[in-house]
Amino acid sequence: MTLASAHVAGVGMVRFGKHPVSVTLEDLGEQAARSALAEAGAASAQVDAVFVGHVFGGPVAGQRIAVRLGLDGKPVSNHENYCASGATAIREAWTALAAGLHDVVLVIGVEKMTDRISGGVRPDPNDLDAAVGYVMAAGHAMSARRYMADHGATREQIAMVAVKNHAHSVHNPFAQYQRAISLDEVLQARQIAEPLGLLDCSPISDGAAAMVLCSPRGAQRLGLAAGAPRVLGCALVSGSVERAGESINAERVSRNAAEQAWRLTGVDPADIDVVEMHDCFTIAEIVRLEGLGLVPVGEGARWTAEGHTSLGGRLPVNPSGGLLSRGHPVGATGVAQAVELTWQLRGSAGGRQVENARVGLAYCKGGTVSGTDGGSVTTLVMAR
Amino acid sequence: MAPSTELPPFRAGLFQLDPFALLGTRCTACGEAGFPARSFCAGCRADGDAIVPATFAERGEVVSFTVVRQAPAGVEVPYVLARVLVDEGPRVMAQIVGAASTEVEIGDRVRVVPAVFPSADGSDRAGFAFQIEQEENA
C-alpha cells in the first residue's frame, strides 16, 4: 500500500537550547510556525488544519499557538507519543493530505522543558518500570553493557557517537551545542547510569520546529515550484511484549518500524542516503541503526568509530547533530528531524550537507511501557 | 519477614509472600512465561484457556545491569538496576539490593526478595528486588 506523498512547502525552526522562562511554549511554537508559513508563502486563510506534537505543553497547547497565528476556527489536533510526538503529528498530517481531507496543513513540534523538567524524564508513575526506579538513562546503560559483552564493542566506540554528532552540529546554527567535543570529554564526564555519562545523554531543551505540507492541489494553491522535497510516508509502530529469551538489544520494534516504512513508501533500505536517528543516548543510535537493518547487527559501534556514519562516510547519520547535540525538546524533535531532511534534500545544509542526498530516513522513539520493547516508534521517509 | 511485606502491595497479583516468589502466567501451548500476568502469550499469541497462573522460581541470572547515579528529584541515588532472567521464567527488571555495584557482573546468580516500591501517590508499597547469591557466584 502506497499513499500519495506530501510536498514540503516551507520549514522553520527556533534554535534548540535553554530559553528564558519569559519565552513561553506558545512563543516558540508561533515563531517556528511563522518561519515555515513565510517560506511557504502561505497566508493563514490558505491553511486548512494544524497538527501539533508536544508532551508537556498541557491541554490544547496547539490551539493556544494556532490562535496567535490567525488560525482560530480551523481543525487543530494535539498529538502525544512522548518523544515521537512531533513525528506522529507529521504522520497524521500526511494521511489527512493523502485522504484528501485537507490540501495545506501546518505541522508544529514544540516543547518547553528547561523550566519544568530536571534530572531526566521518567515513566508514568503507575507503570511498574517507575516502581523499580527505571529512568531512561538506565535502560540504555543496560543496553550498552550487554552490547559490549555480546559484540566485543568498547566503551570508546560507543562514546564516539557523541563525538561524531557534536562535530556535525558545529555547522548547524539551530543546534543547542555548536562545539566539537573530544573522546576524553565524553569518557570523563560525570556518570549518569554506568557505563553512560552526561555526554552520552541528550540534554533537556526548549525549542520548536514547523513545516507546511501540502497535497498536489495544495501545491497549486501556494504556487509551489516543482522539485520540492516530499514526505513519502511515515510508519508508526508500538513496542510489543518482550520474550524472556530474546536479547535486550533485539530491537524488534525497530525492525517492525523499518519493514512498515519500506512497505508504505516502496523505498529500499539501500536507497537511504542520510539518516536522522533518535540518539537520545549514544548506544541508542547504534542498536537502532542495526534494528532498522541499515547496519549489520553487532557492527554499529565499529562503524561509528571507523567514521562510516560520519559526514562523508558511507551512511551519514545525524548531520544535524542529532538529539545529543542539536538538543531534545521532546515534542519538537520529530519535526526538527524532518526539517533537517528537507534542508539536506534541497542541498541547502551548508557545512553539514550530505553530498547528493536524495532519500532520507528519520527515526523517533517515544516512551517506555513496562515489559515491552518501547512505547512508540516512527520511521519517516523523505525524498527529493 | 522484612517490614515491606506488611505494606499494601504495589499491585495485586505480582508476588506471593511465603515463600516469596513472583507470580504471573504460563502459556500451556508454547511454555512462554508472562510477568506481570497477561491474558495472552507474547510468544505464540495464544489466549483464553491456554494461559494459566504460574509461580516462578526464586532464582535467576543477571542479563545486564547499571548503577543509576542521577534520577529525578526525590529519588535517592545511587542504586543498582538490573534485568534478570528468572529460571525457566520471565525476564524481570528490578533493583539489586545489598550489593556494591562493583560486586555485580553479567551472569551473576540472584534471588528475588521483598522490597519497598514508591507509588504514584507518594506512599510506600510492597514490591520486589533481587539479591546476589554470594555462595553461588563464588
Image (spheres, rainbow, N blue to C red):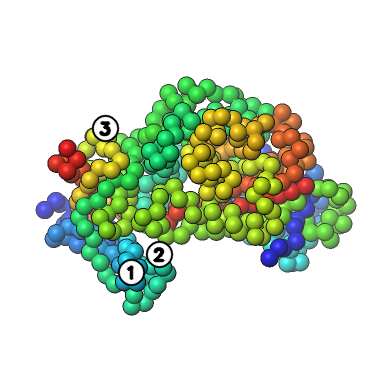
Assess disc 2: are there few (<14), some (14-19) or many (≥20) residues with their C-alpha within 10 Å of its C-alpha.
some
Q: Which of B42 and B31 is in front in this view?
A: B31
Q: Is mark 1 on a helix, strand or loop?
A: strand
Query: Mark 2 belongs to which amino acid?
Result: Gly
Q: Are discs 1 and 2 less than 8 Å apart at CB? A: yes
Q: Are discs 3 and 1 less than 8 Å apart at CB? A: no
Assess disc 3: are there few (<14), some (14-19) or many (≥20) residues with their C-alpha within 10 Å of its C-alpha.
few
Task: Choose top left, top right, bottom left or bottom right for residue A45.
Answer: bottom right
Q: Which chain is home to disc 1?
A: B
Q: Where is residue A215 in the image (x, y as percent from the top left)?
A: 79, 59
Q: Residue at image x 53%, y 30%?
A: A305
Q: Position of residue A343 (x, y in %)?
A: 74, 40
Q: Tell me the residue that label 3 is attached to.
A: B102
Q: Which of marks 1 and 2 is nearer the N terminus?
A: 1
Q: Are discs 3 and 2 less than 8 Å apart at CB? A: no
Query: Mark 3 belongs to which amino acid?
Result: Thr
Question: Which label number is shown at residue A85?
Answer: none
Q: Give the number of the mark in front: 3 or 1.
A: 1
Q: Residue at image x 82%, y 59%?
A: A216
Query: Mark 1 belongs to which amino acid?
Result: Cys
Q: Tell me the residue that label 1 is attached to.
A: B27
Q: Residue at image x 29%, y 45%?
A: B62
Q: Can residue B68 be seen in this view?
A: yes
Cα distance, mark 3 to mark 2? 35 Å
Task: Choose top left, top right, bottom left or bottom right for residue B127.
Answer: bottom left
Q: Position of residue A74 (x, y in %)?
A: 72, 61
